[in-house]
Image (tube, grey):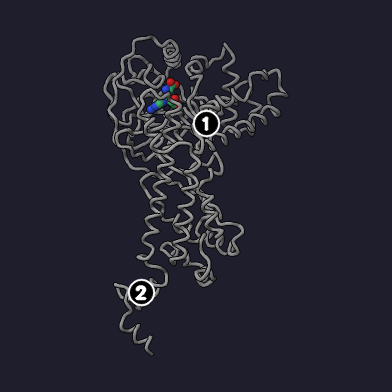
Amino acid sequence: SSSTSSAAAAAASLPASPLHHRSSLRTARALPTLLTITTSTTDIEAEALWTWLAQKGAVSDEATAVRPACVHHGRGLLAHRTISQGDELLSIPRKLWINLETVKASAIGRFCEGLKPWVAIALFLVREKAQSNSSWRPYLDILPQALDSPLFWSDEELAELQGTQLLGSTLGYREYVESEVNELFDKVIKPNPDLFDSSLFTYDAFLWAFGILRSRTFAPLTGDELALVPLADLVNHLAGLEVEKPCWEKTTAGIFTRQEVLLMRAAKTFHAGQEVVMQYGKSKNNAQLALDYGLVEYDAFSGSNNRDSFMLTLEIPKSDRLFDDKLDIAQLNGLDSSVYFDLTRGQGPPESMLTFLRLTALGGSDAFLLEALFRNTVWDHLSSPVSRDNEESICEAMIEGCKSALYGYQSTVEEDLLLLNNDNLDPRTRIAVVVRQGEKCVLQEVQTWFEARMNELDQLEYYAERRLRDLGLLDEKGNMTAWARASFII
Ligand SMILES: C[S@@+](CC[C@H](N)C(=O)[O-])C[C@H]1O[C@@H](n2cnc3c(N)ncnc32)[C@H](O)[C@@H]1O
């Protein structure tokens, strides 16, 4: 049927927009032991940043709870003394953030009217980075030149992502950045050669700035409030870290002049010398962690990973002769003809997805449920199996969809797991392998779920039986009641 093929095609499709990543709730994972780090080499750039922040009154050697240092993942923050959960770690005043205000107050401010915050800040970063006498030099010097997000991978490295949704999102983001850069180049950079040296404002330079902004900004300083906060952006992520409250907090401080500050609080207790870490996003899946931060979570011991996910797109085919009626029901329930479902490892298909699938596959002798009489109740009816035919067709569609999506990957889960046993796997290949095996595991789980359902089609209760039971015409065992038998005899 057309709904079958559409759901099958849908199972393999990519997120519609690179900017609309869906999130879902995930369960807790075990917390790895924190490592105590000792640094031997002097980090000249970090020292310069510290001195600069001290001169501006943002930090002091005497009062500080944390200090920047070289750690496993580039630079990070080390506890200077024992810190309890919830303690203040640092407080950086607004005048030291790089945000839209900073850009507006700069020499290029008058060109930023109407620009998206990230575009304006990226323009500022690229220009400022090239100026040796920039007043932001100590901060600019600690920004990494190379990032591990797939946005920056070579074609050869990207080939490891063949078949994955992450590859689609990566290419989508690149296209998006390119179109923004082209527009900016034509409207702002080219017409103002006195302020902008056009050779600096390349696609690569903007992509770097985009990567810096995605990997170093955290709520609440995102969206229109987007801001880079020196020192606070040196905190690294710890896999599995449970947090009660966000670590970044925007508040006001100061006795005489109340000024806005970014306050960072400790997510847990840290002892002197330990690395202070935070949780970058409990609801982000591995593909999002990879894109934003160039990292993934993978637990080689448990094998399970609630960061594994697959975003499924389902749609009511336009060719369906019942399209208008089905769309009406979907819209009445807050959906549209095309819907994304974020499937997460170990969680099975969400109820709303099963309901939408049943709606999509509705036809034949079940089409009466689309009549006006049922308009307000049909969604409820669809939340349980409707008929054997309907349930069978959604199972077939999903099994086919999963198989065809799985066919698109170049390796099996088993091959990937073997690769992940190799401790010397380079970081980018590791990211690719973790993401692709995660997507496949989710698809396999979904396929297994629908295969199991296919095997129990004869045991399920369908709409007709439920109606008879509701009317008191079937008893608990599914037999007709005496009253029903009597009515049939009459
Ligand atoms: C907010 S910055 C943290 C400071 C960064 N380490 C530096 O040297 O500038 C985020 C970046 O740190 C790195 N990072 C943080 N936590 C990590 C982790 N658990 N595993 C791998 N890389 C991590 C990633 O490169 C990420 O994009």
- 2 and 1 marks in contact (CB < 8 Å): no
Left-right relation of 364 to 309: right
The residue sitting at 38% across, 90% down in the picture is: 490
Q: Earlier in the sequence, mark 2 or mark 1?
A: 1
Q: Is mark 1 on a helix, strand or loop?
A: helix
Q: Quadrant of the N terminus?
A: bottom right
- Observer-nearest of 328 and 64: 328
Q: Position of residue 315 (x, y in %)?
A: 54, 54
Q: Quick check: 441 above or below 222?
A: below
| Mark 2 surroundings within 10 Å by alpha-carbon count, few (fewer than 14), some (14 through 19), many (20 or more) | some
The reply to whether the residue tagged 1 has its Cβ within 8 angstroms of ligand 1 is: no
The percent coordinates of residue 407 (x first, y second) are: 49, 43
322 relative to 151, above or below: below
Quarter holding residue 34: top left
Give the residue pinned by disc 1.
159
Q: What residue appears at the point 63 percent right and 19 percent down from the top-left corner? A: 200
Q: In this view, does 372 lie to the left or right of 35?
A: right
Is residue 288 at all visible to an observer of this figure? yes
Image quadrant of residue 469? bottom left
Kind of residue sitting beneath label 2 = Arg
Label ID, residue 431? none
The residue identified by callout 2 is 469
Residue 388, position as x, y percentages in the image? 43, 66
Q: Residue furthest bottom?
A: 490
Q: Nearer the viewer, residue 197 or 400?
A: 400
The reply to whether residue 257 is visible in this rendering is no
Question: Could you classify mark 1 by the number of other residues whose Cα lies within 10 Å: few (under 14), some (14-19), or many (20 or more)?
Answer: some
Dot 2 falls on a residue whose secondary structure is helix
- Residue 116 lies in what quarter of the image? top right
The answer to which of 329 and 424 lies nearer the viewer is 424
Depth check, front residue: 169 or 443? 443
